[in-house]
Amino acid sequence: MSTSSNTDSANERLIHDLATDLVPVRRLRAPSVRAFTWLATVVAIAITLAIIADLSALGHRLSAAPDMWLSVTGSTLTAILAAIAAFQLSLPDARRTWALLPLPAALLWITASGVGCLRTWLVPGTHAADLSEARDCLVFIVGLAVPLSALLFIMLRRACPLQPELTALIAGLASAAAAATLLNFFHPFDPAVTDLAVHVFAVAIVMGANWGFNGRLLATNFLRSGVTLAVPRSN
Amino acid sequence: MIAISIDFTLEGTIFGPGFASFYGRRRGPNSIAGAEIPTQVMTKIVPNDPAAEADRRWSALMVAAQAGDGVAYQALLRDCIPVIKAIARRRGVVADRIDDVVQDVLLTIHRARQTYDPDRSFTAWLCVIADRRAIDLLRRVRRQELREVYAPLAFEGHADHAADPTQRLFRADATGIATRAIASLPARQREAVQHLVLEDRLLADAATLTGRTSGSLKVNLHRALKALRARIEPQE
């Protein structure tokens, strides 16, 4: 009886603490709207890069290698769908199945890149990336994905993801896919196995870093709500 | 008697909230789905549904809470408790842990209140959060059980050195020395010892609680232990 009244009073105390000095909150916009806000930033970066990139060379490469279209479409769709999935997952009532949303596009991206590698093997005279060029790809993808991930993290932390690691992982995929898409402006060689391996490695680094770092930050952000540890627990 | 519009167009997608199909998703009078595909919306007269009525009331209270109304917020959180307890029980949470789930869910509602969309059912939103927090607690308990062993005979047979009166005297004395030594530490070092050693908190939890970085806590703990060693050892 006394235990029950103790827990009731603990709950009552908690409710009182939460309601005291309650501040108004601005309701979050729909996840798709927030995702498109982030994607608008990516588009702005793309326009900036397009100004300094050699667009005629890019057009020539795309017309000469139709599989590159598929690869670019795959990475672009992966970025869009992963961003939408990440914003959905950041809601406390989101289902984990949202994490599957970017997978078909990611499969298209990987498969088309694989076809590109095959073409490099079969067609003589193609310019495949050497190790230093592959290293430049790695630096570009990781270097651009870092600020994109940071922006995504800032936007995601206003929600309350109850699955912070999964949310951060998918956010990492969105950032890496966006960076890989933008890399096509400065990718004057055909994909080879080393190139593909470096791209996969770069995407894995970005996703792993997001999972490990931003996932923990999102979880900590939840604990930092200011009341979590100040309230006595019932036991 | 009230009229309820049942919308068959967008329910049952794999991305819908877990309990939405069970509790129903409310749509406003200007529902796009209903306006665009009128043939798929059926209206029927049903008796007043207390669950739907409660959902509408809670949604209104939550909207008021989002605007900063503390009284509405208190009423809403009190109303949520029986729902949370029922979900925790259904998930298999043991009786003495149910209030842990309740408090976790209340804190989550507080932290996530800006994510609630009044166009959606509050009950469905609450149920998914409560279900997830109940599962989180069950996982925590399972992990704890894997680490700890239930061995009542070994516990009973274990000699309690603290029961020795001389030991108790020594401990009281040592505790006094340690307490004085800790009290004489600078505030930040004392804070690190308090949270990380005496209260045995995880570094991340202590960092959250104190608002300091993990690195700062570690450095202060290291300095504190060095200072304590210097102060206590000469007296032994």
Image (cartoon, rainbow, N blue to C red):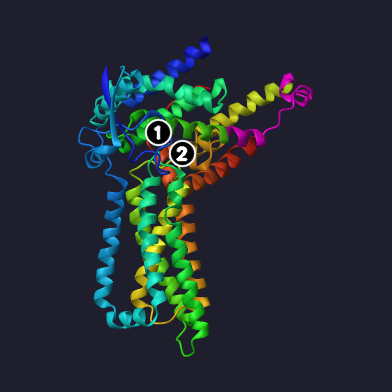
Q: Residue furthest front?
A: B39
Residue that mark 1 sits on: B21
- Residue B193 location in percent, x, y? 53, 37
Residue drawn at (24%, 27%) of the image:
B64
Instruction: Identify the subunit bearing mark 2.
Output: B
Q: Amino acid at mark 1?
A: Ser
Q: Earlier in the sequence, mark 2 or mark 1?
A: 1
Mark 1 neighbour density, 10 Å: few (under 14) some (14–19) many (20 or more): few
Up/down of A125 relative to B1, above or below: below
Confirm whether the magenta stretch covers residue B144.
yes
Which stretch did the figure color magenta? Answer: B140-165
Residue drawn at (56%, 26%) of the image:
B92
Q: Amino acid at mark 2?
A: Pro
Q: Residue furthest bottom?
A: A125
Residue drawn at (32%, 24%) of the image:
B55
> Which is nearer the eye, B186 or A44?
A44
User: Can see residue A212?
Assistant: yes
- Residue A221 location in percent, x, y? 40, 43
The N terminus of chain B, quarter of image: top left
- Residue A59 location in percent, x, y? 31, 80
